[in-house]
Amino acid sequence: MPLGLPPHLASSTASLAVVRAGHAAAAACLVAAAAVVVTLQVTLPEITVWPALIVLAPMIGLLVLLDRSPLAFIGAGYLFVGGACIAWFTVIGTAQLDTVPRNDDFTVGLVKSAVILIVGVGPGILRAVAWTTAGLLAAEVSSAVVITALGASWTPAPGPIILWAFLVAGLASLRLQRLRARTALPLLYRAVRDEMLAETRRGFERRATALVHDTVLNDLALIAQHDEGPLRPGVAESISADLATLVGEDWLAEDPDDMPVEAADFARMLADATAGELAVAVSGDLAVLDRIERDARAEFLRAIGQALVNVRRHAGVAEAEVVIGAGHDDVSAMIVDAGCGFEPSPGGDGRLGVDMSILARMEAIGGEAQVWSREGSGTTVALRVPATRPAPVVASGDGAP
Amino acid sequence: MENVDPLSAAAARPLTVVIAVSMVVLAILDSVTKAEQVTSFPFLVATFVILVAAVVFLVDRTRLSRPGWSRASALVLHGLLVLLMISAALATWGGNVAVRDDWAPLVVALTLFALTSYRSPAELAIWTGVHTGVAAVLGLLQSPYAQTPLPAPLFAISGSVVILIIGSAAVGYARSMNGSVLSWEKRAWRRAESLAREARGGVARSVRQQQISRAGRDAMPVCSIVWSIGAR
């Protein structure tokens, strides 16, 4: 169901649609009139009615012009030619079919309808009413003149008047609808904008919640597990960096468009996550990260970072490996360590860090995460996110153009 | 819904109902004034049953509480309209003086126009062609019983021209109006998106403030103390 139009556009758009409808109907009338002429000429070859087609051609041409370039002089020309066409049809019908000229003749009625259905020249309800009325007058005056000249009596035909009244009533109803529509659109605008702002806010809150987890909760866990005595240098630096991050504005900022991107982002993530305590071997092409949309890429890197933080804090090893890869429509990362591992519980690993900072984060960007681990056998975290840009086509390498 | 849909489907609903009622009134008046042309009362009754079914279907499917029309529903309605024309022709078979003033093609044409806010221009064009063809064939078949001795193809034209004219108007209206509405909708969404984008900074700062307040109240004092002790 299409939504409506704002009040300032409703009137002109609706009246323009009525004008277009009128032109389409007028074209159908002229086609039908031409079909009648052709049928008569073919089935009754002894009469000569084909000259009636001659005046239909310019009328159709002017109608097409009027629809494409709604100019007043083309409209006036259409009415003039239409009037001539009505007279011409009446004369030919009277002469060739040997009938008394009548104002309610079927074929002439079709041409008259085409003239009245000019409806308007461009948008504007009052203008459309004026042009329709001019069409009715042109049709009836032309008909009256030619019928009187042929020696018959002219009486008004009900058909064209009913058509005119129907069109004017339709245009008047559009004017009433325009008045009713005056207060409608501000409500629509407000609803759409509010919904978009709420969605924006939800996105920021999701990001902030994940950030708080990455910093505060992890730091608290780290402190709880720490031995008596001063903090190890790496831990102290990590807490200091987290505090700075929390009160800073970096996490809010949109990445600038001209930032070099994948490698720099990845390096920054790596430095933050390892805090100088973890050696990470990275393999794979970092350029594939460019295939992920910017916000999703930031979240993807944060998830990798969180997996590395977990290795650093819980695995009991000083090395880890990150493998970056890509398929046709996704980008993946695998974080592998040979640490102490753990027993994942069914339906999730049961650890807040993995659930909140990795699984939920990946789901939020339309990706997925899987964790494989066993006590004493290390942990592997596999992340996958849909790519928004397709994989580049690799040249065949045979030198062919 | 009318408040946010001033000139389209919801706003067109009253007009649809008016057209639907007008169709029944028109059919009754025309049948009464031309009662002498009726040759089969059972077919006349069947015609009115089909007409009422089509009108009820049209009014029901355009209710604001219903989802948009499916193609299957449109097929049912147009099937009823074809049956209506055939049944109406059979009701006056052999007694129809002039096919050009029959009410059934006019009802079909008005239904096509009533559908402009609900169906696509392409579909309306196809059904205009189908109904025009059916009416033309029925006009042709009834030509031997006409009072005026004219070539048979003229009855095909005069019997179907009202559908062609009003159907063409419906297609022209739907193409222009629906095109304009959809085009405006696209622009309105872009505008709303741009407004939301402009407000991102403010929203982000507000969320940040909220998070800092929470963290500052609960966790940051602990972290700060531990860090200051540990860093010494």
Image (cartoon, helix red, strand yellow):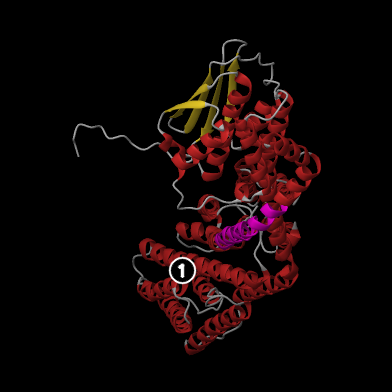
For label 1, the crowd category at 10 Å Cα-Cα, with few meaning under 14, some 14 to 19 and many 20 or more, is many
How many numbered markers are drawn?
A: 1
Of all residues shown, which one is farthest toward the front?
A: B232
Residue that lies at the very extreme toward the right in this rendered image? B217
Which quadrant would the C terminus of chain B be assigned to in this image?
top right
| Dominant SS in magenta | helix
- Residue A10, x across and y down, in percent: 64, 69
Q: Mark 1 points at which residue?
A: A30
Seen from the viewer's position, the closer of residues B146 and A228 is A228
The segment highlighted magenta reads B178-206
* Vertical side of A110 occupied by A394: above or below: above
Q: Which residue lies furthest to the top in this view?
A: A376
Please report, as a chain letter, where disc 1 is located.
A
Q: Quick check: is B203 in the magenta stretch?
A: yes
Residue B190 is situated, as x and y percent measured from the top left of the image, at 58, 58
Can residue A209 be seen here? The reply is yes
Q: Tell me: A338 left or right of A189.
A: left
Task: List x then y, in percent, for residue A400.
Answer: 18, 36
Which amino acid does the dot numbered 1 rest on? Leu
The image quarter in which residue A341 lies: top right
Which is nearer the eye, A138 or A218?
Answer: A218
Residue A187 vs residue A130, the one in the foreground = A187
Q: In which quarter of the image is residue B147?
A: bottom right
Please identify the quadrant where the N terminus of chain B is shown.
bottom right
Q: What element carries label 1?
A: helix
- Write down the quadrant of residue B7 in the picture: bottom right
Vertical position of residue A90 compared to residue B180: above or below: below
Residue B11 can be seen in this image: no
Residue A145 locus on image (x, y percent): 50, 88
Q: Is residue B154 magenta?
A: no
Decide: is A249 above or below A319: below
